Image (cartoon, rainbow, N blue to C red):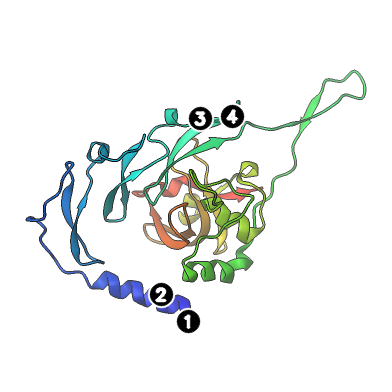
Amino acid sequence: MIVYCLLVFLSLVAADHDDNSCHDYSCTNNNVAAFDPFRKECYCHCVDESSCSHLNCPHPYCSHFWIFYKCQCGECNTDSHCHCAGGETPRCIKDVFGGHQCHCDPAPVTTTIPPKTTQKPTTTQKPLVKLECHHRKISVIESIAENLHVEDGRAELCPGTTKHQTPEAFVINKCNSTAKSSWSQGLSIKAICDNKLPHLEAYTPISTFTPNGEYLAGFFIACNDRGFKMAAQTCTEAPMIINITDFTRPHVSDFYTILS
């Protein structure tokens, strides 16, 4: 019932949109006037990073989520702004909600078995299996309806906070999974939605694995004519349902099932 009421509310808000002119609305710092259909008022939105230079922070940027543009202080704008421990690869991630945050890709880990005879050392890895927890569907839906972040101490901290509420925290908590550093790329979601691979169970955990792209993890819901729907959260946005297409960032082709 809670989920139904939430969906009805969002539909009414989206439908109650009138054309409004903000030509006479004054903005500074090279910002542009626009109309907010939810608050029904004019506001100033940024155009690019140069529109946000008035912010007193090292890496200001123009955040874009849905129809909204606003200046924010990010942890980075490029990979060179991020610093990681030795062996790790720094990346500046721009997620689907417009946030900028640093992420450190871990160095590959292997286990060496000492030789018993004169044979050379060999390396072994545990067999990887698909992370399964579609039976946790109700728990995922409840988190979306409650509109509250899901936290888990096994996930990384959100930049500049003490909160473990990153995208992978949502998956780790619901699936009782290991940390993201142990995840590997599984089946392609694009191939599944193109009917090139078998059907995927709804609420199967998925993630992006692009080394220099936008990072996002969550739960696959269903394919549609433009891509697919998933449930996800970020450091700044509580769990919600979003549509992934070839025009969003990340793209449909960036997502895979998770091997752990």
Say whether residue 73 is left or right of residue 174: left
Q: Is residue 223 visible?
A: no
Where is residue 97 drawn, in percent x and y?
A: 38, 52
User: Where 38 sits versus 59, above or below?
Assistant: below
To which residue does mark 3 refer?
83
Q: Amino acid at mark 4?
A: Ala
Single out the mark in the foreground, 2 or 3.
3
Name the residue: 49% across, 64% down: 148
Disc number for residue 85: 4
First in sequence: mark 2 or mark 3? 2
User: Where 92 sits versus 69, above or below?
Assistant: above
User: Where 16 sits versus 222, above or below?
Assistant: below
Q: Badge 3, how many Cα within 10 Å: few under 14, some, many 20+?
A: some
To which residue does mark 2 refer?
6
Q: Most extreme residue toward the front, as rendered? A: 56
To which residue does mark 1 refer?
1
Say whether residue 22 is left or right of residue 212: left
Where is residue 255 drawn, in percent x and y?
A: 49, 48
Q: CA distance from mark 3 to mark 4?
A: 7 Å
Marks 4 and 1: in contact by CB < 8 Å? Answer: no
Q: Secondary structure at mark 4?
A: loop
Say whether residue 177 is left or right of residue 151: right
First in sequence: mark 1 or mark 3? 1
Marks 3 and 2: in contact by CB < 8 Å? Answer: no
Quadrant location of residue 125?
top right
Quadrant location of residue 51?
top left
